[in-house]
Image (cartoon, helix red, strand yellow):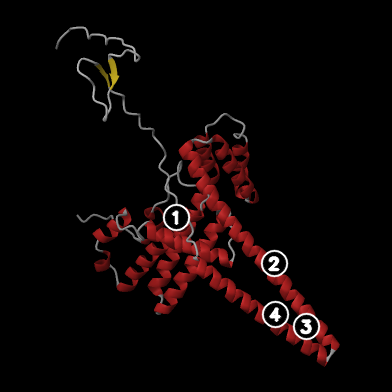
Amino acid sequence: MSDRTPRRPQAFRLDDPSVVVAGEDRPAPRGAVVVTPAPPSEAVEDVVVLPPAPPKTSRWGTLFWTGLGGLVSLGVGLAVTRLIEDLFTRADWLGYVGLAFAAALALACLAILAREVFGLMRLRTLNHLREQAATALAKDDRRLAETVTKELLAIADASPRLFRARTELAGHLDAIIDGADLIRLTERQLMAPLDAEATQLVSDAAKRVSVVTAVSPRAAVDLIFVLLTALGLVRRLALLYGGRPGTLGMVRLFRQVLAHLAVTGGMAAGDSLIQQVVGQGLAARLSARLGEGVVNGLLTARLGLAAIEVTRPLPFAALPAPALKDVASGLIGRDETKEP
């Protein structure tokens, strides 16, 4: 090796006419000092994958349902009005009884409508919070991160299980923390216990579907049970993460879950658990009914994972997303005994 001392680069000024900053479309003249601008350093950013937005209804579909709902409402209103008039013509007390029943029905309809609107607004709020959190992570926006944290604290105020987490997180709001770090701290404090409970809910639902499908004698019973279990699982996950979906909210939420499954490729054939199932030749080792039960359980688990990502108000950034092997590992028992 040479022990020659490396020569110090010669200093120069950028306003010197002999110094040229070379570019792709600007060749340097002969004899000039060429300065090549260094490429910008690639910033390490969090890669946050958000679930797809809720599918939007077309204008014609909205017009169709609006017209149909209006006609049905007018028809029901006219039928009730004629019924009350007929009751008054028979006897006054019958008319008043019918009028009281109509008032009770109208009050119940208003309460149900208000609950549906509140449920839709809450789901929209959770989706908006997830998008804001992703933006705060990408841009390191402190003000936006603080807004997201305060709204999540207000939503989690009704959950007794998060009392300690809320107290600890509220004490960090006045601290000097970057926006991205505040989102990660909020996720660790508020989402960690909810993620553990959600994973257990999905695992239990997958096991129930697997057992019932394996022992059920009718395919129709399997279909009804799987459908009811999936709807109940999605609703419980939404309630766990702060959603209050009604009937319309459940329809919208289930459509979003199915859209997320379609985008992520359904059952994720490259998953390690699926590779283990295929590699061990499950279809050759188990009976047809038991194999069908295992497959239905895996499908339910995959649906539950998609529901977690859709109903969770924060994207997975600081915490790892639950995988299929975490919620469906109990469906398949590995024979670890070695033959002599």
Q: Secondary structure at mark 1?
A: loop
Residue at image coords 51%, 55%: 311
Residue at image coords 46%, 53%: 309
Percent x, y for residue 77? Answer: 70, 80
What kind of residue is marked 1?
Pro
Using the image, determine if residue 158 lies above or below residue 220.
above
Q: Could you tell whether 118 is left or right of 28 in the image? A: right
Spatial CA distance of label 3 from label 4 is 13 Å
Would you name the residue on which mark 2 appears?
A: 111
What kind of residue is marked 3?
Gly
Would you name the residue on which mark 3 appears?
A: 98
Q: Secondary structure at mark 3?
A: helix
Would you name the residue on which mark 1 appears?
A: 52
Give the crowd class for mark 1: few <14, some 14-19, many >=20 residues within 10 Å: some
The answer to whether the residues at label 3 and label 4 have Cβ atoms under 8 Å apart is: no
The answer to whether the residues at label 2 and label 3 have Cβ atoms under 8 Å apart is: no
Would you name the residue on which mark 4 appears?
A: 77
Spatial CA distance of label 4 from label 2 is 18 Å
- In front: label 1 or label 4: 4
Q: Which quarter of the rendered picture does the C terminus lie within?
A: bottom left
